[in-house]
Image (spheres, rainbow, N blue to C red):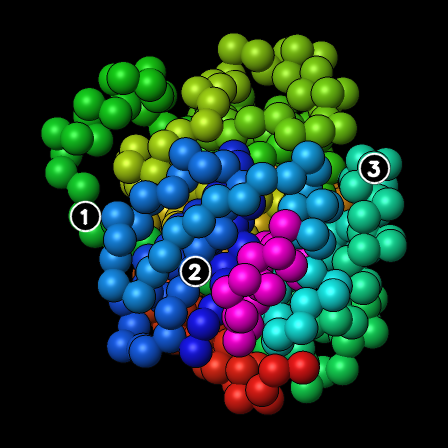
C-alpha cells in the first residue's frame, strides 16, 4: 500500500508536535511492513532527511499558503501518486481527497479554553478543524482526554477515534555520568537546587499562576526556578510578573534546550512544575518521570491522565494549592522517593515503538476499507 505523509510542519519549532513526528516516523519506518511511505514536505531543503531508507521516498511541493498546500498541493500529489491513504501527524487532511485519510489530534485546548488562542487561529478551529474531523476515516487522539474532546466538540463517532499515547526517548531513561551533569550545570549556570519548567509559554500553560505560587515558596526555600522554554503568544503580561513580583534574581531563563541536553536538566532538577489549565498528552511529564524527576502538575485533563498517582496533583486555578504542592515535594523526603519510583515505573508504559505499532494499526485498518 502507498501512504502519503503530510510533513509541512517538519521544520517548525522544536515543541511537542515536532518531537512526536520525528520519533513516530523513525519507529514507523523501522516496523516490518511492505507499505511504501512518501514523505511530502513544503520545504525542499528537507528532501534527503531520511537518506533513501528502504520503503521511503521524499518529495517537496510548494504553495503560497498553508491552506493551499493542504488542500491543493497535496491533492496534486495524490492524483499523481495514487495514494491508498494520506496521513497527517498534525491537524488537517485534504477535504477533496479520493483516498482514505487519517490525522492526529494533539489536543483541543482551543475548544476547552478558546480565550487562549489567537483570533486568526480561532477561525481555523471553528470552520476547518470540524470539517477535517468529518472527512477523516480515522482520528488518532494522543490521550483519552483528547479522544473524549474530539467526540464531544467535533461530533466524531467514537468508532473513528483511537487513542494512541506518545512515547518517551530512551535517553531520558538512562543514567547520566556525573561529569556530564557537572558540565551542563556549569555551561548553563544552573543553581545547585532548582524547580524546572519545560515547554512553550502560552495561555493554557497557566504560567502566571505558576509564577505567583513560586514567589510564595521558592525564595523562602532558597530554590530558584529554571524556565527551559520560550514565549509563544498572549503571555506578555504573565512574563512581566517576574519583575513585578520581585523574583527576577530567582528566575533563570536559558531558553529552548536541545534534546541532547534536556535529560540533564531533569536529572538535576528538584521537580518539574507543570500546573497547566489544559494539556492533552504533555511530553515533559513523560520525560520527567523517566528521568527520576518528580512532578507537580494539574489535577485535570491530560496531566492527571498521564501522571495517575505518580505525581503531586494540584488545583491549577488555586495558587495556594500549587504553592503547597511545590513545598511538599521538596520537604517530604519519603514522598519524594515514593513519587520518583512510581514515576519511573509508570513511564515504562510509554514508548515510541508502541506508539508507532498502534498508529500503523489504525492506518492499516483505514486502508482496508479501500479507496473512496
Q: Which residue is mark 2?
A: 38
User: Which quadrant would the N terminus be assigned to in this image?
Assistant: bottom left
x, y percent for residue 150: 74, 69
Q: Of residues 249 and 150, which is closer to you in this image?
A: 150
Of callouts 1 and 2, which one flags the residue occurring earlier in the amino acid sequence? Answer: 2
Tell me the element at label 2. strand
Alpha carbon distance from label 3 to label 2:
31 Å
Q: For the magenta stretch, what is the residue range?
A: 73-93
State the image coordinates of residue 66 (x, y, percent, origin top left).
68, 42
Which residue carries the number 1 mark? Answer: 175
Residue 105: percent from left, percent from top: 64, 61
Label 1: few (<14), some (14–19) or many (≥20) C-alpha neighbours in 10 Å: few
Which dot, 3 or 2, sits closer to the camera?
2
Which residue corresponds to the image point at 57% horizontal and 82% vertical from the top-left?
A: 366
Q: Quadrant of residue 161?
A: bottom right
Residue mark closest to the camera, 1 vs 2: 2
Tell me if mark 2 has few (under 14), some (14-19) or many (20+) residues whose alpha carbon lies within 10 angstroms of its own.
Answer: many
Q: Is residue 339 above or below residue 17?
A: below
Q: Going 13% across and 38% down the picture, which residue do you hit?
A: 177
SS assignment at label 1: loop
For this orientation, the residue located farthest to the bottom is 369
Amino acid at each position: 500500500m502507498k501512504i502519503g505523509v503530510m510533513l509541512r510542519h517538519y521544520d517548525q519549532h522544536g515543541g511537542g508536535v515536532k518531537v512526536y513526528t520525528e520519533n513516530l516516523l523513525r519507529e514507523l519506518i523501522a516496523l516490518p511492513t511492505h507499505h511504501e511511505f512518501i514523505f511530502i514536505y513544503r520545504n525542499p531543503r528537507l528532501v534527503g532527511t531520511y537518506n533513501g531508507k528502504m520503503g521511503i521516498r521524499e518529495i517537496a511541493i510548494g504553495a503560497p499558503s498553508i491552506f493551499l498546500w493542504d488542500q491543493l498541493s497535496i491533492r496534486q500529489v495524490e492524483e499523481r501518486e495514487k495514494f491508498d491513504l494520506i496521513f497527517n501527524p498534525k491537524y488537517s487532511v485534504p477535504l477533496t481527497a479520493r483516498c482514505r485519510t487519517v490525522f492526529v489530534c494533539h489536543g483541543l485546548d482551543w475548544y476547552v479554553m478558546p480565550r487562549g488562542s489567537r483570533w486568526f487561529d480561532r477561525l481555523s478551529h471553528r470552520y476547518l478543524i470540524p470539517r477535517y474531523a468529518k472527512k477523516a476515516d480515522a482520528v488518532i487522539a494522543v490521550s483519552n482526554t483528547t479522544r473524549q474532546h474530539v467526540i464531544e466538540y467535533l461530533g466524531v463517532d467514537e468508532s473513528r477515534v483511537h487513542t494512541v499515547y506518545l512515547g518517551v526517548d530512551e535517553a531520558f531513561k538512562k543514567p547520566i555520568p556525573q561529569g556530564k551533569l557537572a558540565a551542563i550545570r556549569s555551561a548553563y549556570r544552573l543553581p545547585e537546587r532548582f524547580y524546572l519548567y519545560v515547554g512553550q509559554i502560552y495561555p493554557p500553560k497557566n504560567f502566571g499562576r505558576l509564577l505567583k505560587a513560586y514567589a510564595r515558596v521558592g525564595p523562602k526555600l532558597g530554590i530558584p526556578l529554571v524556565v527551559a522554554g520560550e514565549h509563544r503568544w498572549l503571555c506578555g503580561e504573565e512574563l512581566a510578573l517576574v519583575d513585578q513580583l520581585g523574583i527576577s534574581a530567582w528566575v533563570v531563563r536559558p531558553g529552548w534546550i536541545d534534546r541532547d541536553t534536556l535529560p540533564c536538566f531533569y536529572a538535576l532538577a528538584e521537580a518539574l512544575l507543570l500546573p497547566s489549565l489544559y494539556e492533552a498528552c504533555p511530553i515533559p511529564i513523560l520525560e520527567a518521570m523517566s528521568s527520576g524527576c518528580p512532578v507537580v502538575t494539574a489535577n485535570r485533563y491530560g496531566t492527571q491522565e498521564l501522571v495517575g498517582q505518580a505525581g503531586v496533583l494540584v488545583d491549577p486555578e488555586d495558587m495556594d494549592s500549587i504553592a503547597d504542592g511545590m513545598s511538599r515535594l521538596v520537604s517530604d523526603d519519603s514522598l519524594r522517593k515514593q513519587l520518583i519510583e512510581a514515576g519511573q515505573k509508570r513511564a515504562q508504559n510509554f514508548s515510541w515503538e508502541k506508539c508507532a505499532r498502534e498508529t500503523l494499526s489504525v492506518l492499516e485498518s483505514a486502508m482496508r476499507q479501500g479507496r473512496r
